[in-house]
Image (tube, helix red, strand yellow):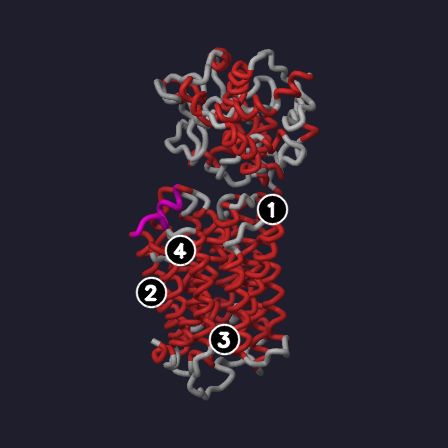
């Protein structure tokens, strides 16, 4: 095996594959899972991931300027050492500070590793078929990440394997390489604006890739149709490998811009197809093709194709590409996915202009008059359109009607139904049943058939406008089990308030009678017997403390808007709801009713989706821990 790795090319392909596996399966995947298992979420998670980006950007830019370690091999081994150490440290029970430190180390290690590898890549690939070796290394890295046994393994095992592979990278980099003779510059000289265009194109592609990856990973229906199941994973892995090899071949035959253009067309198609959950299988075919093609170019361009007058200049170019195109592009893509939950078609169009424009420039630059005439006509049409009086239709719609349009346009029906199924537990959880005739009167009907989130048929009678607004801004903070992305951007204009008004209108004439039925509900005896106060305390922290503790994320943020201030149940202060029961058992029953269905007329929601056992455990913990303050009250 060692003798094979000494062959020109395979050493470089192996180093590329290890780097990609570390970045994809650990830095982008298992490390985030580890953080989630450790309870790092919300603003804390953003701080941790920001540390990784800072470490990556700093070390990408500083590595070419470090003169202390002139040996490329020594510098590469330093990058593998930092990266491997971060992987092993992530196995520890990290707190917030520890998570930030390890995250910064991941970014720093990758910054040193990637820039060093591409700056001196010919040292490990040789001068014979270096592009093929880049394609083979990239495709193999993606294939390894998609092996079902590896992809589906625990975050701890993935981190361990990533760390061990870094140790392997150190060993491979120490193998003697045969001397290679090649010219430094492999491409004709281009003005600086071509290099800037390349950075912008890579940033746009990484942006699209990161956004699509985050959306798929955080949407169960999309995830099930893309990389869940052995068949999907094997198909993805083989597509990645084939696309990487094809991309390397096209780079040598047709150049950078064709590969980036093809990559955009595949990634852009995948992002648009993801807007429709029924097209997820087709999107899963385009996505790996686009990703692998630009990934090959991301390695090959700074190492083999970008013109440079010295090794130092080549390193600086690589640093700028990875700092801006890689780290900043990735951060922006994830941020857009978190805030919007989808990739807007307008952004896909803008990214297409950035990526496709350089390749089209050469063919269009001799048609200046035609372009100028088209521009003048376009500007004139734009001005005429905006000078014409706008249609008064939208002004004639009520706020609820406008909100219903927002509900449809944002695809809420993809995750929420509006149909309480008769003769099921729906009736107790969500409210009275609408008749088929009432449902048919809707234009269009919004019954829905998916329930990644709760049913919304009676949400206006179960959630206050304030709760709905706070939930749109930070779903995971307001509801501990929520996988819903933030829709806070809707409140940049009137769409957010319109959507809240529409949801607030979703209630039927039977809502009041249903609230009476809720008051008559009692915990089953079997659930009371199974109640666990310790487990109840954990559930309280996850679902309730965001409002009912001084360090909660929701209560302090919306303090001034509450109808009645949320009770700090850890101290008993600010109690606005007095429990009349005297015994612990009676108080537990009353607290269970509140936990299950909330308090009508306040912003206190119910937790209808919790099992009776969970409700019993929470109410038992509450009855034991707030007993004295209630007596004093």
Counting residues from the start of the chain, the first of labels 2 and 4 encountered is 2
Q: Nearer the viewer, mark 1 or mark 3?
A: 1
Furthest toward the left, the residue is 231
Q: Which residues are magenta?
A: 221-230
Q: Position of residue 32 (x, y in %)?
A: 50, 51
Counting residues from the start of the chain, the first of labels 2 and 1 encountered is 1
Cα distance in 3D space between marks 1 and 3 = 36 Å
Q: Which mark is residue 439?
A: none
Q: Which mark is residue 303?
A: 3
Counting residues from the start of the chain, the first of labels 1 and 4 encountered is 1
Q: Secondary structure at mark 3?
A: helix
Q: Quadrant of the N terminus?
A: bottom left
> Which residue position is annotated with label 4?
287
Cα distance in 3D space between marks 3 and 4 = 25 Å
Q: Position of residue 553 (x, y in %)?
A: 63, 36
* Front residue of this view, candidates 270 and 166: 166
* Front residue of this view, candidates 479 and 422: 479
Counting residues from the start of the chain, the first of labels 1 and 3 encountered is 1
> Which residue position is annotated with label 1?
44
* Front residue of this view, candidates 479 and 595: 595
Seen in the picture, residue 23 relative to 487 is either above or below; the reply is below
Marks 2 and 4: CB-CB under 8 Å? Answer: no
Magenta-colored stretch includes residue 123: no
Seen in the picture, residue 598 relative to 17 is either above or below; the reply is above
Residue 21: quarter of image = bottom left
Q: Residues within 10 Å of mark 4 (few under 14, many from 20)?
A: many
> Which residue position is annotated with label 2?
242
Q: Nearer the viewer, mark 3 or mark 4?
A: 3
């Amino acid at each position: 095996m060692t003798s094979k790795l000494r062959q020109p090319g395979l050493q470089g392909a192996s180093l590329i594959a290890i780097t990609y596996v570390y970045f994809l399966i650990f830095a982008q995947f298992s490390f985030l899972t580890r953080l989630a298992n450790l309870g790092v979420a919300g603003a804390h998670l953003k701080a941790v991931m920001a540390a990784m980006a800072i470490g990556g950007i700093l070390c990408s830019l500083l590595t070419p300027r470090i003169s202390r370690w002139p040996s490329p091999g020594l510098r590469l081994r330093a990058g593998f050492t930092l990266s491997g150490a971060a992987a092993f440290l992530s196995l520890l029970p990290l707190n917030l500070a520890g998570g930030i430190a390890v995250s910064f180390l991941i970014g720093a290690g990758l910054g040193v590793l990637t820039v060093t590898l591409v700056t001196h890549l010919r040292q490990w690939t040789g001068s014979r078929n270096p592009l093929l070796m880049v394609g083979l290394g990239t495709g193999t890295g993606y294939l390894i990440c998609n092996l079902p046994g590896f992809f589906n393994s625990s975050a701890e095992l993935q981190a361990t394997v990533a760390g061990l592979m870094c140790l392997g990278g150190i060993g491979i980099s120490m193998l003697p390489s045969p001397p290679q003779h090649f010219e430094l510059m492999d491409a004709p000289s281009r003005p600086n604006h071509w290099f800037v265009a390349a950075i912008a194109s890579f940033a746009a592609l990484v942006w699209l890739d990161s956004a699509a990856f985050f959306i798929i990973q955080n949407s169960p229906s999309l995830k099930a149709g893309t990389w869940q199941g052995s068949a999907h994973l094997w198909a993805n892995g083989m597509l990645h490998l084939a696309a990487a090899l094809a991309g390397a071949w096209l780079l040598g035959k047709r150049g950078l811009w064709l590969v980036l253009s093809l990559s955009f067309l595949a990634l852009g198609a995948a992002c648009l197809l993801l807007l429709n959950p029924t097209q997820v299988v087709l999107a899963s075919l385009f996505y790996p093709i686009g990703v692998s093609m630009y990934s090959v170019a991301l390695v090959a361009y700074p190492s083999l194709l970008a013109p440079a007058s010295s090794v130092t200049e080549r390193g600086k170019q690589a640093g700028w590409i990875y700092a801006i195109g890689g780290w900043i592009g990735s951060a922006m893509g994830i941020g857009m996915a978190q805030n919007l939950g989808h990739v807007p078609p307008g952004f896909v169009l803008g990214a297409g202009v950035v990526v496709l424009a350089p390749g089209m420039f050469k063919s269009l630059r001799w048609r200046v008059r035609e372009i100028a005439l088209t521009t003048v006509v376009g500007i004139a049409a734009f001005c005429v359109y905006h000078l014409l009086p706008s249609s008064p239709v939208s002004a004639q719609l009520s706020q609820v009607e406008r909100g219903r349009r927002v509900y449809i346009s944002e695809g809420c029906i993809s995750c929420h139904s509006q149909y309480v199924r008769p003769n099921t537990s729906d009736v107790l959880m969500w409210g009275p049943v609408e008749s088929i005739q009432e449902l048919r009167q809707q234009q269009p009907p919004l019954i829905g058939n998916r329930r990644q989130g709760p049913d919304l048929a009676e949400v206006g009678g179960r959630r206050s406008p304030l709760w709905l607004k706070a939930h749109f801004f930070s779903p995971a903070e307001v509801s501990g089990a929520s996988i819903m992305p933030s829709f806070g951007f809707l409140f940049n204009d009137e769409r957010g308030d319109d959507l809240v008004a529409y949801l607030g209108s979703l209630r039927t004439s039977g809502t009041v009678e249903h609230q009476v039925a809720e008051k008559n509900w009692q915990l089953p005896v079997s659930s009371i017997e199974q109640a666990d106060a310790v487990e109840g305390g954990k559930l309280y922290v996850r679902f309730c403390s965001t409002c009912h503790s001084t360090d909660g994320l929701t209560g302090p943020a919306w303090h001034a808007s509450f109808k009645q201030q949320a009770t700090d149940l850890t101290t008993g202060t600010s109690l606005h709801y007095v429990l009349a029961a005297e015994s612990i058992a009676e108080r537990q029953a009353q607290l269970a009713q509140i936990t299950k269905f909330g308090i009508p007329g306040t912003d206190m929601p119910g937790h209808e989706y919790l099992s009776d056992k969970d409700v019993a455990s929470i109410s038992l913990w509450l009855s034991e821990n707030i007993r004295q303050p209630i007596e004093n009250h």
